[in-house]
Amino acid sequence: MSHFAELENGIVVRVIVAESLEWCETNLGGQWLQTSYLGSIRKNYAGVGYTYDEVRDAFIAPEPEGNLGFDETTCQWIMPKIDIITNEGE
């Protein structure tokens, strides 16, 4: 079993587990692409609302507010680092 993303106009509308791409197309219709939790297929695991970029052959998350740019290698948004303050030892 593998994970597959259904696309409408290049946007992921659902992700399912199925036997094959052919099964998805035959039984559910529409446009489907395989995705992977490990990011070994199409750079990132597809999520609802993600865009499929045909040129990069990648699923890309919606652009988050406050991002610092886009990493072309990973196809992920670059976010500022946040320092976490803990009260350990008090």
Image (cartoon, rainbow, N blue to C red):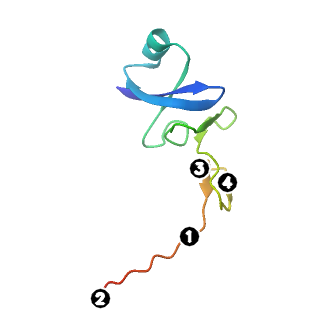
Residue located beneath label 3 in the image: 74
Q: Position of residue 84 (x, y in %)?
A: 46, 76
Q: Nearer the viewer, mark 3 or mark 2?
A: 2
Precedes in sequence: disc 3 or disc 2: 3
The Cα atoms of the two marked residues, 4 and 2, are separated by 38 Å
Name the residue: 42% across, 41% down: 37
In the image, farthest residue toward the left: 89
Q: Which amino acid type is marked by label 4? A: Phe
Residue located beneath label 2 in the image: 89
Precedes in sequence: disc 4 or disc 1: 4
Decide which of 69, 50 is in the foreground and name it. 50
Q: Which amino acid type is marked by label 1? A: Lys
In the image, farthest residue toward the bottom: 90
Residue located beneath label 4 in the image: 70
The Cα atoms of the two marked residues, 1 and 2, are separated by 24 Å
Taking 38 as reference, is 85 above or below it?
Answer: below
The Cα atoms of the two marked residues, 4 and 1, are separated by 15 Å
Name the residue: 50% across, 76% down: 83
Q: Disc count in the image?
A: 4
Q: Are marks 1 and 2 in contact (CB under 8 Å)?
A: no
Residue located beneath label 1 in the image: 81
Q: Secondary structure at mark 1?
A: loop
In the image, farthest residue toward the top: 26
Precedes in sequence: disc 4 or disc 2: 4
